[in-house]
Image (cartoon, rainbow, N blue to C red):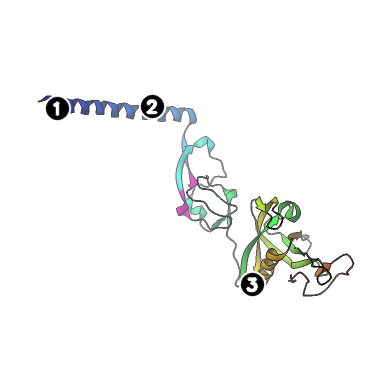
Amino acid sequence: MNPRQRRGVLLMIIAGIIAIAVFFTTLSYINSARAQWGETGTVLQLTTDVPANQRLDPSQVVEVSVPQQFIEESFILNPEDLSGMIAAGDLTAGSYMQRGMVIPQPDLDRGEREIAIMIDVETGVAGQVVPRSRVDIYATYAGDGDQRPSCATRVLTDVEVLQVGVSREEVDGQTGEVGEALPVTFRLSQADTLRLIYAEAFAQNTRLGLISAAGAGEPSNVQYCGEDNEDSESTEPQGGGAQQ
């Protein structure tokens, strides 16, 4: 055996010793971690960002092992439990899936639409509106002087809230001020969907009025325009909104 061959054999022996050392070091670490944290369990981890109200798919999660003591009852452990679910808020990749992060996708009747708009946290909901609440939706429109006074309009009456999302910062497009808003999702007909989209696009503010559990009663006027004007029953509000 020449010197070059002897060096090769020596390097192979050293590599084998290193491999064995790494194996036993890893095994020792695993045993140490198991002794410290106890047994491990499997949870679901999100692999991609999922926007609010987006349908979830089992392919968007992977199973990862975590110490059993950190696994709570709220964790989702079976990928199939995500079938037919949508994100309750904006979800980020790497999150461990829990039941409060997802909700069942609503079953819409033929011709119905599911639509979400951003509502100011302080003036719009104040924490009282929850899924299955019934609300009126109001909008305020700025006037332009004598030709068109400022008006507050009831856009829709007695509509169902499907979901209330997680609040986030929103920048007012007119004033540039930053405030807290959250997405509220409604179940609407096609015509009412257009009315709500119009109000959100052109109204200065949109607000919700929570309806009593005893019922909506008979709402009176569609709109009120200016302090000096009497309540109006017109179905053509000055601000462009419409009643249900």
Callouts 2 and 3 close, C-beta under 8 Å: no
In the visual, does 37 lie left or right of 146? Answer: left
What is the spatial separation of the Cα atoms under label 1 and label 2, in whole angstroms? 36 Å
Q: Nearer the viewer, mark 1 or mark 2?
A: 1
Residue sitting farthest toward the right: 228
Q: Which residue is mark 3?
A: 190
Foreground label between 1 and 3 = 1
Verify CB contact (< 8 Å) between mark 1 and mark 3. no
Residue shown at 19%/25% (left/top)?
10
Counting from the top left corner in percent of width and height, residue 227 is at 88, 64
Quarter of the picture holding the C terminus: bottom right
Looking at the rendered image, the disc whose residue lies closer to the viewer, 2 or 3, is 3
Give the extent of the magenta segment. Answer: 42-61
The amino acid type found where label 3 is placed reads: Gln
Give residue 160's quadrant in the image.
Answer: bottom right
Secondary structure of the residue carrying tag 3 is helix
First in residue order: circle 2 vs circle 3:
2
Q: Position of residue 133 (x, y in %)?
A: 71, 59
Which dot marks residue 28?
2
Give the side of residue 207 with respect to residue 184, left or right.
right
Q: Residues within 10 Å of mark 3 (few under 14, many from 20)?
A: few
Amino acid residing under circle 2 = Ser
Residue indicated by mark 1:
4
- Residue 133 magenta: no
Tag 1: Cα neighbours inside 10 Å, few (<14), some, or many (≥20)?
few
- The secondary element bearing badge 1 is classed as helix
Q: Residue at x 17, y 25 (%)?
A: 7
**Residue 95: x percent and y percent?**
53, 45
Q: Nearer the viewer, residue 131 or 208?
A: 208
Q: Are the residues flagged by discs 1 and 2 in contact, CB closer than 8 Å? A: no
Q: What number is the disc on residue 160?
A: none
Compared to 64, does 86 lie above or below?
Answer: below
